Each structure stands twice: as structure tokens, then as C-alpha cells.
Image (cartoon, coloured by chain):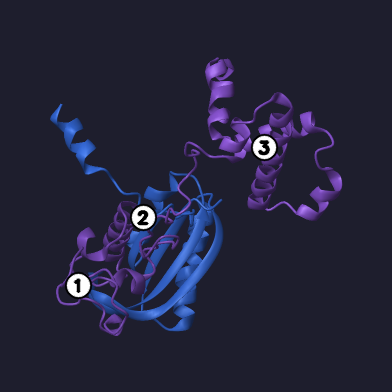
Chain colours: A purple, B blue
């Protein structure tokens, strides 16, 4: 409802018009001044929005139909002149961080993968602050390791010597 | 859809004997109304630790994986049956792991302050 008040509908655009237009002595001079100003603004707005201007020149003849032009420009400008910020999702938002195992299926049979999260000296399972995994994957890994222990797939008290040279995922010295 | 996975560790034996053990295991399964989907051989490797079973200390074993579909009553009966088999070192029934590689949404930052305030109340 507030949009229909005179103060909003007229006063706000009026304040945005240049002094030359506002201080026109008569209605006859005001109208062409307004037309030229709106036409310039329309050019700028459309340029900014990336519309091809050659097509526009041919389609819209210059101040032939001032009333229509004014309406068009008014509608376009109202949407194009940004006075308050447009609500939009943060365009610079980074994608959510993923842990090392995001998207990888964890299996109790995959002993090499499981051994990467186990201490080489004692065979202890590393905690979340060392492995850097998300909650879900840490739980999955723990369950899989314990299962592998019981079923006789993975050694318990040490890390399988053939997997000692694997790339290190867990930073034991500098836990996050 | 596979319901169970039977992880079997057999004694390190010659090929014909291993084949015989597997054959009688699968036959026993089918007798009890299971449908065997797949039989995988994970190779013969040295066990991660020495396992004593049936008055013997085993260091090497043959790993086998049987995908099967069957009634839930099969689990207890088969475990019993396989326990009496001398050549089987370790037997385990597992619900067939559904390989779900869903799109992980990544680590969502948790607001610890909110959690703390909620607990206080």
C-alpha cells in the first residue's frame, strides 16, 4: 500500500531527476527535458544489462511516443536503479569443505584404506582431531576397522608393514 | 537383493581340498533355502594374527566371500554348522553392505555456541 502513496510514487523519482529537468520553467519544456533524460538513462540501463543497442535503435524510435517511452523507462529504471541492496544468495560463497573420504565408500575389506587411519606403532585408531574427517565418515571408519579386527582382515596391535609407506593422511604432530 | 555376506577364512590347503570345502558349504546353504549370488576369492594370505582353531595354530588362510540371499533363520544354523567344520578358521555373517556413495554435502560448520546454550537450559 505504501507504494501507492504520492510521497513514494512521485517524490522519490523526482528527487533523482537532474536539476535541469526539475527547474524547467513550463510544462512544455519539462516534458522534452524529461524525455531526453529518461532516454539517456534507458540507454545506460540497457547497456548495463547487456542488451544490444542496434536492435533497440531500430525498434524504438526516439521521442516519437513520449508517453509510452516514459512508461517503459519508468518500469525499467525502477527495476534497474538499485537504491537498496537486492536480496540474493552470496555469490562468493565457497563450496562446503569436504573431508578426505567424502564420496568414497568405506568397506571393512579395504584394509589398505583403513590402515591409513591407524597408528603404525600401536595400531590405535586415530581420533577425529588427527584424521580431520567429518563425523559420519569417522564413525564409518571406526566401525569398519573394528569389524576388520574381529573378522581377521586387519592386524590389531600394529599396522600391516606393507602399508607403512602409504601416503600420510593424518597429521599427528599438528592436529587441527 | 543380497541380504547377507559370509566372510569365510579357510585353512591354507591345496586347491582340490579348498574346492571341496566350498562346495559342501554352498550345498549346506542351499539346503537351508539360501540363494547364493556370488562367490569371491580374496586370495590366500597370511593372517593378521595367529588364530587357534580346532586344536591348530593357523598362520595362513584362504579368504572367501559369499554373497547370499536367505531367510534370517539361516544365520544361527549355518554358524553352528560351520563351527563343526575343521577346515573353517573363521566364519561371519554380515548384512550385505549397500555401497552408498551418496553425494556427501561436505563438512557443515557447527555453531557450538547454540549447542552450549541449549544444554544450559
**Which quadrant holds residue A100?**
bottom left
User: What chain letter is assigned to the residue under label 3?
Assistant: A
Nearest the eye: A94 or B110: A94
Residue A30 picture location, percent across and down: 69, 30
Residue at image coords 32%, 55%:
A134
* Left or right: where B111 falls relative to A91: left
C-alpha gap between disc 2 and disc 1: 33 Å
Residue at image coords 47%, 74%:
B41
Screen quadrant of the C terminus of chain B: top left
Residue at image coords 69%, 36%:
A33
What number is the disc on residue B86?
A: none
On the same chain, marks 2 and 3? The answer is: no
* Left or right: where A43 falls relative to B42: right
The residue labelled by disc 1 is: A119
What number is the disc on residue A76?
A: 3
On the same chain, marks 2 and 1? The answer is: no
Nearest the eye: A77 or A141: A77
Residue B33 picture location, percent across and down: 54, 49
User: What chain letter is assigned to the residue under label 2?
Assistant: B
Q: Secondary structure at mark 1?
A: loop
C-alpha gap between disc 2 and disc 3: 77 Å
User: What chain letter is assigned to the residue under label 1?
Assistant: A
Q: Secondary structure at mark 2?
A: helix
Residue A53 picture location, percent across and down: 76, 53
Q: Nearer the viewer, mark 3 or mark 1?
A: 3
Amino acid at each position: 500500500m505504501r507504494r501507492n502513496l504520492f510521497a513514494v510514487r512521485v517524490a522519490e523519482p523526482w528527487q533523482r531527476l537532474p536539476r535541469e529537468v526539475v527547474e524547467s520553467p513550463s510544462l512544455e519544456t519539462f516534458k522534452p527535458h524529461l524525455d531526453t533524460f529518461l532516454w539517456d538513462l534507458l540507454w545506460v540501463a540497457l547497456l548495463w544489462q547487456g542488451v544490444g543497442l542496434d536492435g533497440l535503435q531500430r525498434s524504438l524510435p526516439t521521442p516519437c511516443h513520449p508517453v509510452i517511452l516514459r512508461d517503459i523507462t519508468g518500469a525499467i529504471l525502477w527495476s534497474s536503479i538499485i537504491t537498496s541492496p537486492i536480496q540474493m544468495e552470496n555469490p562468493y560463497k565457497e563450496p562446503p569443505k569436504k573431508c578426505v573420504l567424502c564420496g568414497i565408500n568405506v568397506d571393512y575389506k579395504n584394509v589398505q584404506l583403513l590402515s591409513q587411519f591407524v597408528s603404525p606403532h600401536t595400531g590405535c585408531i586415530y581420533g577425529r582431531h588427527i584424521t580431520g574427517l567429518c563425523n559420519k565418515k569417522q564413525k564409518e571408519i571406526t566401525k569398519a576397522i573394528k569389524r576388520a579386527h574381529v573378522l581377521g582382515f586387519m592386524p590389531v596391535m600394529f599396522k600391516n608393514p606393507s602399508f607403512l609407506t602409504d601416503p600420510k593422511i593424518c597429521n599427528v604432530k599438528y592436529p587441527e | 537383493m543380497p541380504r547377507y555376506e559370509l566372510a569365510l577364512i579357510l585353512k591354507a590347503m591345496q586347491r582340490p581340498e579348498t574346492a571341496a570345502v566350498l562346495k559342501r558349504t554352498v550345498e549346506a546353504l542351499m539346503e537351508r533355502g539360501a540363494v547364493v549370488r556370488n562367490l569371491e576369492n580374496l586370495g590366500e594370505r597370511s593372517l593378521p594374527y595367529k588364530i587357534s582353531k580346532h586344536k591348530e595354530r593357523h598362520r595362513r588362510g584362504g579368504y572367501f566371500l559369499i554373497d547370499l540371499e536367505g531367510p534370517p533363520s539361516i544365520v544361527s544354523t549355518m554358524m553352528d554348522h560351520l563351527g563343526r567344520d575343521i577346515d573353517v578358521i573363521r566364519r561371519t555373517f554380515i548384512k550385505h553392505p549397500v555401497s552408498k556413495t551418496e553425494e556427501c554435502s561436505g563438512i557443515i560448520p557447527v555453531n557450538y555456541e547454540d549447542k552450549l546454550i541449549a544444554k544450559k537450559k
